[in-house]
Image (cartoon, rainbow, N blue to C red):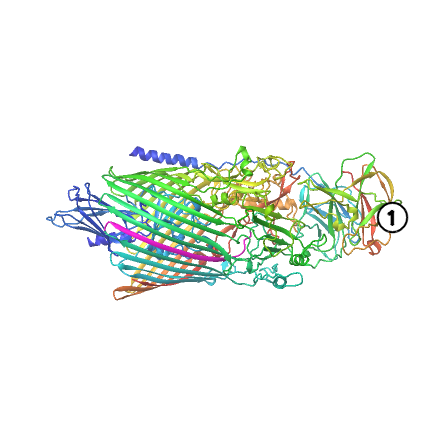
Amino acid sequence: MLKRLLTLSILFLALLAGKEVVAQGITTASISGVVTDTKGEVLPGATVVAVHTPSGTQYAQITRADGRYNFPTARVGGPYTITVTFVGYKEQKQEGVQLSLGQSFTANFKLSDESTQLSEVVVSGAKDPILNSDRTGAATNIRREQFERLPSITRSFQDFSALTPQAGTNFTFGGRSNQYNNFSIDGSTSNNVFGLSALPGGQSNAQPISVDAIQEINVSVAPYDVRQGAFTGAGINAVTRSGTNEFQGSAYWFYRNESFAGKKIEGVKQPLVEFRNRNMGFRLGGPIVKNKLFFFVNVELEKRIDPAVTFPADGQSASGTPYQQTSAELNRLRDFLINTETGKDWTFDPGTFANFDAPSQSSKYLAKLDWNINQSHKLTLRYNQLNSYRDVPPSNSGGFGSSPPGGRQNSNNALPFSSSWYRINNNMLSVIAELNSSFGNKYSNTLTAGYTRFRDFREQAGGGAVPKFPTVDILGPNGQTLTTFGPDPFTPNNLLNQDVFQLNDNFSIYLKNNTVTVGTANEFFHFNNVFTQQIQGVYQFNSVSDFIENVRNQSRTSTNNNYASQYLLQYSALKDQPAPRAEWSALQLGFYAQDEYTGIKNLKLTGGIRVDIPIFPTKLDGNPVSDTMTFSKGEQILVGKLPKSTPLFSPRLGFNWDVKGDKTTQLRGGTGIFTGRIPFVWVSNQISNNGLFFGTINATSNAATPVFSPNPNANNPSPETIKSPPATFSINSTVRNFKFPQVWRSNIAIDQQLPWGLVGTLEFIYTKDLNAVYIRDANLADPVGTLAGDGRPLFGGVAGDATVIAPKDRRINDRIVQALVLDNTNKGYQWSITAQLQKNFSNGIYASAAYTYTDSRDLNSQSGSTAGGLFSGNQVVGNPNSPVLSYSSNLTPHRVIASASYRVEYLSRLATTISAIYEGRSGANFSYVYGNSPNSDGVNSNDLIYIPRNQNEIILTTTDANDKRTPTQIWEQLDAYISQDKYLNSRRGQYAQRNGAIAPWVHRLNLRLLQDVFQNIGGKRNSLQISVELINALNLINSDLGLVKNPARSSILNFVGYETTHNATPTTGRPIYTFATNSNGTPLSKSYLSGTDINSRWQLQIGLRYTFN
Amino acid sequence: MKITRYSLIAGVMASMLAACSEPETPTPVPATAPSSLTANILFVNASPDAPQLNFFINNIAAGTGLTFPNIQESYNTPQAGPLQFRAKAASGQIGGTLGSNDVVYRAGSTNNTNFTTTAGKYYTVFVTDTTTRPKPTTPAGVTDQGGLRLFPVEDIVRSAVAGKAFVRFINLSPNAQALELVDADTKASILPTKIAVKNTRTNKTDTVRNAQRRPYLEISKSVTIDNDRVSTNTAAFTAIDAGSYALQIINSNVTLGTGVKPLTAPIDFTENFEEGKLYTIFVRGLIGGGGAKEIDVESIKHPTK
């Protein structure tokens, strides 16, 4: 018996890759079962006590009339000892039970008469976590041992949630955008609901929680339990560690730098920019009052230093081409700025152009208190905090104007001064309280209340206030930006505060054959977003001399060239608010009810319904000008109206059928509707872009740009002259009956016990979009005709010309630049099929391997934050307002994920662990588009190419004055390129598809070696552990392996004009394209290039850890 | 139970099949022949010290062996749109600042942009300046290669008028000041001194000095009307009465341009303007250039289209 119990306990311990149960709660596990006598008669009134041995936490109950008992909110982990006693019967125990997050462990007991001989004790419990009656939908659990043993170089929990077979890259699941996941820690919503990054700390490359603080993570793709909501991608629920009756702690340190990384790509030496990365922390847990009150704390600090300048002044490329930036010119500029002279009484320190450190830093704190009030009530309190920042170079974007040519960031042409760098701060604080109660043996309740606060803001790099000075871009002799000084244009006033309150209650009733659950889950949001792009003005000068002369002369004549070539300003049109903000609230109320029916033998049915009600109570001002306009198809847009509240219903049904009754074959599945959230930044766009907040100046001619002034407000129109709204403006809005995303998801799966102790799973998931989101421009007129020689729709040649009417003027209303409307569609679907094998050994080994094929189609892959980005980032052939269903950019068609780990203890003092994760996946997908806009829709780089079959089908011309090819030679190069590209060659005579091209397969093998030395001191184990992580090990073996290949040029052809001018009289001329050579004049001949950054190299990280107990 | 299982699986298969359909895309309508729309380009060798030149448009041969001060006999008809104009020495090198490099039309802030043509329009491209024009050393001009330049002008003609010929005057002398084409007897300018230019967006017009009064680098400079840059092709043709004229090139009383010199003496010549024909009168050479490089006037009768 001991051996059997030992086997059982090791089996459960070894469930390291186990795909486990339906999550019934998202912070706990549950134990239930039936107590009978040896003849099978139920025994009501028996006493069942489950004790979580390390903490002494006790759960106790008397069995009900049907002999059943439930502990619905048991603490995750173990080992548990479950004891059943009844007068007149022998006591029975089950020991060594380990509970997984969301697992429903079944422990049935057959009590034998006190007087009978003790024979083989029959303890029947769910042996196999996979073949378990509570699994219905697709879910994966990742346990503490996996965090401790498997490789992860960034110590991010995303490396572990990616063990889910249906995961893709970048925290996506099932081919859906990562904006649609819900991430919770101990039940509190912890994803960045505003949506500028999927998770808190994303903008500063920080993690919201340390892996040392995590007990377990459950990733649910299709949980039919209605307690889980607020996602249409996946629900990722993490539970943190808790203290036990023993003090346990660990201190750790990890380090890596650029010398711990590969030097060669494909046999060629490629230098890697230097960096240093250190991660250290400690955790400690233990009792405050034994068996009653426990604490757990974790503190972690991560520091990384990257160099700011990798293309220094006076440097040159590997081929000897000198960089555009010279210290002579930059010093001349700097000396002019920092000194006064006649006629210039102001000075400005632009900072340095020499190298400096760009730090990224994060500190994470977590404190948890667990209080066993009594056998019926347990309280958990958790506090966690993240403070992180990162110093970032100035943005390459031009905002609403033209972007600085070649970008501002350091390159072989540009070297910005340090004053244009900024620091992004992400600070998060979260508290949650959870009270789990049981009332007798029939009722239980879980009450949760929480508060999470995000404070994101920007400072000058290095800390300190952003200078009150305009941004100045100066171009160099070759026409690319040479340098920038003054602050980054998107930094002044930049601020985002989010406050999220949560209140949930869940009540369960245990009846014969039915467990009924009712509950409510509510979230309250408050946002304050300040985004004032280019509010201090942005000047652009064609040379350093132009700038200096412009400042000196302060006047313009027709003979000198020292004008600013561009001036951009967005000023506040609100009299009393110099920095207009979007401050607003939202609520999402949720109610649910569910029944779990176990009346039919070997079958478990779960059915329930949930209703979610998003509410936007904030009252907004209307825009008196655009509110009265008519847009496309007679539509009217009221920017002051946020969407109506529409209750969204999610009925769900799940089943689990033990086909043969012996848990060797399990068929499970379900169907149901899931309702998610949208990133709230999409709603915030409506509030900030109502046309009333800002006016813009966009001067691009030498005579129209103002003379330079160091005063950032020098060109603000005087308050009396400001018209609100200004002469031309854009608006963002949402349709009145906009619905949050909803999908209908079904899955069916079979789990089968196979020979040699293997368990195989085959799973199919199908998701249909019921309410997907897409965006359209309601001010874009219909096309005027078709593009000659192509066949796609052609839009008007002018925009906003008062003398031309739509559709020859592609703007319906001349005063509106764009009227972007967020709308719903029911087009879109995803499906995936997974085959998985798992083997649970009993001597320190586990292994798992899975292959998943996914298909995902949508109208718009929705990976942007601004409305403009959502619209212009969607590639189309025809009208951007009517996108067609195509591959999602979140799709990874093929994926293999395998993991294995082996640990052995020897010499009573040493232990070695080797573990590995292998991921093989399709490369990233992408679209082949034209540069610029042959269809004249006003959006560049969103037009999918037509792939020509012969030279008649495309008009090509030379790229520039240096091009030595004739059009026929250009065609031959293009033809050869298409022939060697499998995707393009297969689509000659057709248009390219959005995201239809796929980069080559990526192999990633990560290894980890742990060497422990331990010693028992005073009965407690003290161990010292050295860890070595080798990421992308294949690249170490051969520098041709483990590479990430990127498309050489996805904007393969550049549109440079029509045969006849396209203006108010639509052209009948064909479009003309260029197909450039590489920068050294050789023809572009290969579709993919190996990346040379850290993702295509092996990396090593070393670590040291001391663990107590 | 069996029925449930099979119908479930059948439902799954059906939705799988539905999911396998291709995404909808419009049907392309590609062209079946090369471009039928052309622009019209005429080359003129107007530089006194340029060698015999071969011309190329998009690296395709567009005329060979043109010496100073000749024009091609007919317009080339390349595809329309952006075009690269290149001149190579017919034998040997261009020489001078360019050395063995070719003369290429260069524009834009990086001096690498080609010339944009529109289908159905006519352009005359002059080879001007001197082979020894130095490469600029200021940071702003570092991509200017120096030496000879290619200078295109659009030939804008209104429809034929009875009894009229179409004439324009362009000053292509690198170092002469603004000049004027006048009647030798009356000393009155035979071409309008100002032309109207319109901003097509706002419909506002302005008048600017006609090309004849500008040093050649000023000819196609754009002006600002209503905050937009509007290009001024001031080398447009003007209709004048057909007939024989005694003409003179004199210094204009307008000062434009820097580092330019006045003519030391007027240049006299006669010209017979035939009805319906197009003429470009241009001044080439250097003031004080000496010999073949001395400043003088040339006249082109444009080939019929």
Say few, some or many: other residues with alpha carbon within 10 Å of mark 1 (under 14 / 14 to 19 / 20 or more). some
**Residue A427 seen in the current view:** yes
Which residue occupies the foreground of this view, B292 or A735? A735
Vertical relation: B285 (above or below) B35: below
Q: Position of residue A600 (x, y in %)?
A: 25, 37
Left or right of residue A402, residue A1020 in this image: left
Quadrant assignment, res A670: top left
Residue segment shown in magenta: A375-396
Query: Foreground: A909 or B252?
Result: B252
Find out whether residue A1033 is within the magenta segment: no
Q: Which residue is mark 1?
A: B268
User: Horizontal and vertical percent for residue B82?
Assistant: 66, 44
Asked if residue A628 lies left or right of residue A648, the reply is: right
User: Furthest-right residue in view?
Assistant: B185
**Can residue A947 be seen by looking at this rendering?**
no
Element on which disc 1 rests: strand
The one nearer the camera, A246 or A312, is A246
Picture layout, residue A884 above or below residue A178: above
The residue that appears at 26% across and 50% down in the rendered structure is A377
- Badge count: 1
A591, A163: nearer the viewer = A591
Q: To which quarter of the image does residue A1066 belong?
A: top right
The location of residue A571, given as percent across then percent down, is: 57, 49
Chain ID of residue with mark 1: B
Main SS of the magenta part reads strand
- Amino acid at the residue labelled 1: Asp
Q: Report the side of A387 relative to B149 (left or right).
A: left
Instruction: Tell me the quadrant of the picture where the C terminus of chain A can be found.
Output: bottom left
